[in-house]
Image (cartoon, rainbow, N blue to C red):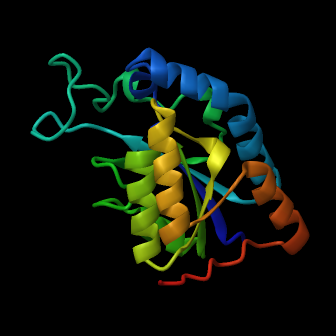
Amino acid sequence: MSKIAVLTNDLQYELVEKNPERVAAVTAATPHFTAFLDGIRRRGHHVFHLQLVNDPDDPNAERYDGHLPVQKGTHGADVITEFLAPEDVVVEKAKDSGFYETDLHDRLQALGVDTVLITGMQTQICVQTTAADAFFRGYNVWVPSDCVVSARPEDRDRSLEWLAGYCATVVTSDEVLAVLDEQGALPRKVIKTP
């Protein structure tokens, strides 16, 4: 059984369609992102989609001109079809991190997963908080730099620099697959403090 899982963040219709910058970033990333997910599946690894579902009673949930997006049961909350495969797992979350008050950790542990690849949108928010929470729980964390997006490229770049300097191995998706093919696993980052 595979010890590796890809976690996608917020690849949902209403979140991506929030503004033209998000649409453009996700559209540009989709071809190689979906190819990467297919490559991960072909190699027998797990894919989990973290689906943000806003609670109408949450005062901190972001609203778009008064409208609460991604509510349970709406099309806007659905994970975008291009990223889904029948064997994938969808895990609902109510906050940015996929680990916060969800059963994600339990599900990953039940499968024997010890390495997670964090992907999706937005790099500086959901990707970063999910990666940090994974690190806090002892996971080996990798971030494929071409499978994360932000509305503003500078936010993405700043976050990738932070992740690489703190808790994750940051490389391209092609490099991830090459290491998997060569070593059969993804080595753990050696954390060094200055």
Q: Choose top left, top right, bottom left or bottom right for residue 5.
A: bottom right
Instruction: Report x, y in % for residue 164.
Output: 56, 64
Task: Point out residue 159 in the picture as x, y percentages from the top left corner.
Answer: 46, 52
Is 187 above or below relative to 132? below
Circle count: 0
Looking at the picture, does residue 32 appear above or below residue 88?
above
Residue in the foreground of this view, choosing between 13 and 123: 123
Q: Which residue is drawn at 40% across and 18% down?
A: 19
Q: Is residue 126 left or right of residue 167?
A: left
Specify the quadrant of the image occupied by residue 190: bottom right
Task: Tell me if residue 37 can be seen.
Answer: yes
Q: Quadrant of residue 31?
A: top right
Looking at the figure, which quarter contains the N terminus? bottom right
Residue nearest the viewer, comparing 190 with 82 = 190
Can see residue 9? no
- Residue, far front: 194
Q: Give how far across and how far down residue 11 sits, in percent.
A: 50, 34
Nearest to the observer: residue 59 or residue 145: 145
Residue 178: horizontal and vertical position, in percent? 85, 59
Say whether residue 6 is left or right of residue 124.
Answer: right
Considering only vertical position in the picture, is 177 above or below 134? above
Q: Going 77% across and 38% down the picture, which residue do you hit?
A: 35
Residue at the (53%, 73%) spot, across then down? 110
State the residue in front, 158 or 67: 158
